[in-house]
Image (cartoon, helix red, strand yellow):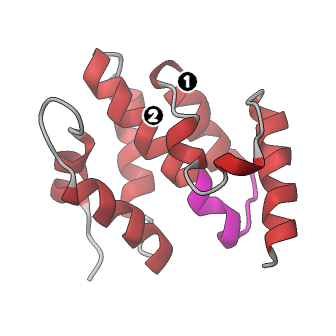
Amino acid sequence: MKNEEIVAQLKEICNDLNLPFDLLDVQDWGIIHADALRTEEFLNYYHEKSLNQAIQHYVFELIVASYNDAILIGVNNSYIEKSFLSVIDQSCDPMYLLIKEYWQNIVSKDEFPVGYVINKHMKCD
């Protein structure tokens, strides 16, 4: 997929999710737009939208970063956890593995607890 197509699709996702778009944010788009209070919304979007593989990883990263924040502020619930784990368990594409590896490498109880969840539930062999 060409960069212009990725940018166009990210703009569409931003519009769908009422997020601002800045071309300079594309590399860290998911981390920049993470929102613990919208984790469930982002998970539902991921499950309901037909996103091509080249763009799915952006939403995946948004979900992981948002879930991390949800853990930190204590707003994760059983539905969100179950939905998050289903996304983690299904994400063995190399691009997803890079994102998972990133969070696993920075894991810490006080800042990045989602890395522990990924370590425990990642089933990609």
Q: Amino acid at mark 2?
A: Ser
* Residue 72 image point, x, y percent: 27, 23
Query: Split into 4 quadrants, where in the image is the C terminus?
Result: bottom left
Which quarter of the rendered picture does the N terminus lie within?
A: bottom right
Q: Residues within 10 Å of mark 1 (few under 14, many from 20)?
A: some
Q: Quadrant of residue 83?
A: top left
Q: Which residues are magenta?
A: 49-58
* Cα separation between marks 2 and 1: 7 Å
Instruction: Inspect the magenta stretch and tell me whether residue 110 lies in it.
Output: no
Foreground residue among 72 and 80:
72
The relative height of residue 75 versus residue 58 in the rendered view (above or below) is above
In this picture, residue 102 sits left or right of residue 65: left
Q: Position of residue 93 (x, y in %)?
A: 47, 77
Q: Nearer the viewer, residue 23 or 92?
A: 23
Do residues under tags 2 and 1 come within 8 Å of each other at their CB atoms? Answer: yes
With 102 as the anchor, is 111 left or right in this view?
A: left
Q: Report which residue position mark 2 lands on.
A: 66
Figure disc tally = 2
Mark 2: give few (<14), some (14-19) or many (20+) Cα within 10 Å.
Answer: many
Residue 8 vertical position relative to residue 85 in the rendered view, above or below: below
Considering the numbered disc 2 on the image, is that residue within a helix, a strand or a loop?
helix
Which of the labelled discs sits on residue 38, or is there none? 1
Quarter-of-image position of residue 112:
top left
Q: Amino acid at mark 1?
A: Arg
Q: Is residue 109 left or right of residue 102?
A: left
Which residue corresponds to the image point at 77% horizontal and 51% vertical from the top-left? 10
